Amino acid sequence: MLELSLDYSPINHWKTTHLQYYYNLALELAPLREKGVLIIGSGNIVHNLRVIDFENVAASPYPWSRDFDERVKRYLTTGSHSALLDLNQMGLSAAMAVPTLDHYLPMVQALALQGKGEPLKFIFEGFQNASVSMRAFQIG
């Protein structure tokens, strides 16, 4: 087992080039995957603890939370990796859903390893506490 940690600068966390850097870094892991190594990324699509409803785990998602999660789902489904690397083009819902990148980056890095035409399927989808979405997917 090999564990990787993320080192990100919160000052520049919204720069597309920053997300592209981590995407490109993950591409370096492709030879391991080709050798049969299972690569797992763990995080959240939406993760905003500033507005979380700690009292109600089953609280309805905020509209911006649902909007962002659905956009990400659409981009994942269509293989639109570049759209997932440009949070600025997703507007206010992205700003609320991803106030820091620590929970979003694992998805970006796992996605970088998706081969051309390789299927992606969702194995879990759900929200909790109004401002956290759990969206698990499998590539291949």
Image (tube, helix red, strand yellow):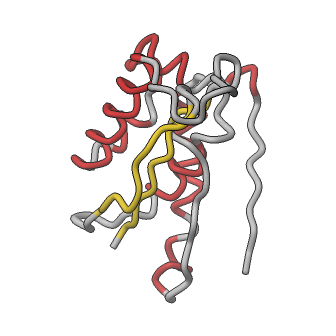
What x and y, as percent, mark residue 132? 56, 34
Position of the N terminus, as image quadrant, is bottom right
What x and y, as percent, mark residue 40? 57, 67
| x 22%, y 47%: residue | 78
What x and y, as percent, mark residue 48? 63, 25
| x 63%, y 41%: residue | 103
| x 67%, y 28%: residue | 100
Picture quadrant where residue 32 is located = bottom right
Above or below 56: residue 45: below
Q: Is residue 89 left or right of residue 79?
A: right
Of residue 51 and residue 92, the one placed in the foreground of this image is 51
What x and y, as percent, mark residue 113? 45, 64
| Residue at the limit of the structure toward the top, as seen here | 92
| Residue at the limit of the structure toward the bottom, as seen here | 35
Position of the C terminus, as image quadrant, is bottom left
Picture quadrant where residue 14 is located = top right
Of residue 131 and residue 76, the one placed in the foreground of this image is 131
Q: Is residue 96 left or right of residue 103?
A: left
Above or below 50: residue 122: below
| x 52%, y 50%: residue | 107
Of residue 133 and residue 106, the one placed in the foreground of this image is 133
Picture quadrant where residue 114 is located = bottom left
Of residue 139 and residue 114, the one placed in the foreground of this image is 139
